[in-house]
Image (cartoon, rainbow, N blue to C red):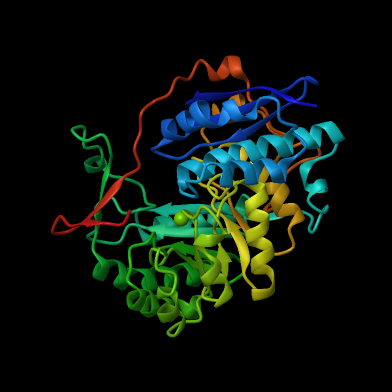
Amino acid sequence: MKISNARVIVTSPGRNFVTLKIETDAGVHGIGDATLNGRELAVASYLTEHVVPLLEGRDPADIEDTWQYLYKGAYWRRGPVTMAAIAAVDMALWDIKGKVLDTPVYNLLGGRSRRGVLCYVHASGRSIADTIEQVRRLREEGYRAIRVQCVAPGIDNMYGTPRGMDGQQPDLPFVEEGWATEKYLRFVPELFAAVRDAVGFDVHLLHDAHHRLTPIEAGWLGKRLEDYQLFWLEDAVPAELQESFRLIRQHTTTPLAVGEVFNSLYDCHQLIREQLIDYIRASVVHAGGITQLRKVAHFAEPYHVKTGCHGAADLSPVTMAAALHFGLATHNVGIQEYAHHAEETPEVFPHAWSFSDGYLHPGEAPGLGVDIDEKLAARYPYDRAYLPVSRKVDGTASSW
Ligand SMILES: [Mg+2]
């Protein structure tokens, strides 16, 4: 069997998604997600101009060799654009292999390690009372793990919370969020005390600091959250400096998660080897596909580090499908983030994966169990969009 054709489909059903479709001379096709939020067309161009011409004529069965060829053959390694492009090819090839062998991809990765993949959703409140109400409602909907974010008094347009009217800013192509570390640090322990008081301990609670703290501030916060038994404190500090997590570890036993912006094992090997984190957040789409993410997970297993894959709504249903096959099969999977897509997204990307009683399951369809309706996709043209930027009270740019 040979790859006969590959093409990139950019569509915006609710938000922008970049999808690679690989076709074979046997009539079987596979799809992969290449979405890089805010930089979608860079990956689309990298794929169309540089990767697609290399795929024609290759045997789709040789997934590992194709991965190494695209990674090493380009000479210029890593980075989110390159690795999202490789991830899309990788996902599509796993999809094809599953269809050819008439079995779901999880079966090719070693079979089931669990009945379903524990997932977490987002509660995002304007006040503590509003947040508690959301946590209660999500519990009633069957979710067993909930990320809790709430507007801290005095911070405008805070990450992970609903935006007020002043978040619209029509003169800018992006939203500007505010930041004040001291207000945030004062508020978060109060928030978790109130939520635990209201809903008890029979639900996993998570929190995302979204790269806003320094290591010593993160240690301070983690220590004060210990009594509330968080599942994890996410992205406490940016992790370009991997050893910065040593300082956090010296001060707190709150479990730590990081890595949604990572692109390969090389971004996290020190964090894992020194046991500086508990969960690695690398995702299928941004970390080179199933092939690379499996290597991250296998490397992490002896160090007691589990995966907790990023799963924001900008990761298409194709990535979610791939993440769930990986999640069902891989032993040291901890949890999967699950942010709901817009109503029109699953119409463009019909999929076999589903949610039930706190867990996600990839379904039993051969391959990844997800496809793209190209006719419908064409009705939603690309819509230029940017991620927000963050500034401190005095106007200094800060990490978003
Ligand atoms: Mg996050």
Q: Along the horizontal axis of the image, is 132 left or right of 343?
A: left
Viewer-nearest residue: 72 or 167: 72
Vertical side of 354 occupied by 27: above or below: above
The structure residue drawn at horizontal position 40% and vertical position 68%, both measured from the top left corner, is 241
Q: Is residue 14 visible?
A: no
Q: Along the horizontal axis of the image, is 267 left or right of 70?
A: left
Q: Residue furthest bottom?
A: 250
Expressed as whole percent of the image width and height from the top left, the position of residue 165 reads 25, 40
| Number of numbered discs on residues | 0
The structure residue drawn at horizontal position 55% and vertical position 67%, both measured from the top left corner, is 269
Expressed as whole percent of the image width and height from the top left, the position of residue 149 reads 41, 58
The structure residue drawn at horizontal position 39% and vertical position 79%, both measured from the top left corner, is 219
Examine the image and state in which quarter residue 265 appears: bottom right
Q: Residue furthest left?
A: 394
Expressed as whole percent of the image width and height from the top left, the position of residue 98 reads 80, 37
Expressed as whole percent of the image width and height from the top left, the position of residue 69 reads 63, 42
Examine the image and state in which quarter residue 61 appears: top right
Q: Is residue 121 visible?
A: yes
Viewer-nearest residue: 380 or 142: 380
Vertical side of 103 occupied by 298: above or below: below
Q: Quadrant of the N terminus?
A: top right
Q: Along the horizontal axis of the image, is 40 left or right of 111?
A: left
